[in-house]
Amino acid sequence: WVGPFNDLAFGLFRAAKYYYYPGWHEPGTGLELMINAEAWNTLPADLQAIVKIASQAAVTDTLSDFTYNNGIAPRILLKKHGVQLRPLPDEVLSRLNEISDEVIREMADKSELAGRIYASFKAYQEIVNPWTAISDRTLLNLRPNP
């Protein structure tokens, strides 16, 4: 599931009264647009720009919508439906991380395309993670949790 906003809408609180966090398998809301490269290359530059800007706007709007509504939904789940928030234990998160890395590496080893995507993703992580650790993560840890 995407997060508490969707979980509330789907009525998952009827099936389970415990809400475990974090959503390790899907840390955030995202959208993607895939266009066949040959078809894309036939578009004139102005239409490519329109598609690119419209896609960026859709991602920004969706992220804003889900950030806000994922902030509201847990309050409703807890107060109105009696759901209990529970953290996944560190050992469980660590093991899930290990297993998911193994599965992804196996997929990358079996497919040239998956291998390139995985290598690109890992290279991106190596660039971004150190900065995230001293910027976003530090700032969020300093903010009081109401």
Image (cartoon, rainbow, N blue to C red):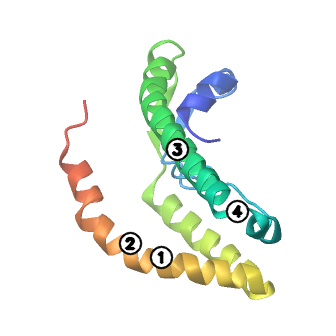
Three-letter amino acid code at disc 1?
Answer: Tyr
Q: Is residue 21 above or below residue 71?
A: below
Three-letter amino acid code at disc 3?
Answer: Ala
Mark nearer the N terminus (1 vs 3): 3
| Residue 71, image x, y percentages | 42, 30
> According to the image, label 4 marks what residue?
44
Specify the label residue 54 is tagged with: none
The reply to whether residue 29 is in sight is no
User: Mark 2 to mark 1: distance in Å?
Assistant: 6 Å
Mark nearer the N terminus (4 vs 3): 4
Q: Is residue 121 above or below residue 52?
A: below
Q: Secondary structure at mark 2?
A: helix
Q: Residue at x 55, y 29 (%)?
A: 5
Q: Residues within 10 Å of mark 3 (few under 14, many from 20)?
A: few
| Residue 28, image x, y percentages | 52, 49
> According to the image, label 1 marks what residue?
124
Three-letter amino acid code at disc 4?
Answer: Pro
Q: Which label sits in the foreground, 2 or 3?
A: 3
Give the residue at the far top of this rendering: 80
> According to the image, label 3 marks what residue?
57
- Number of numbered discs: 4
> According to the image, label 2 marks what residue?
128
Circle 4/circle 1 CB separation < 8 Å: no
User: Mark 1 to mark 3: distance in Å?
Assistant: 23 Å
Mark nearer the N terminus (2 vs 4): 4
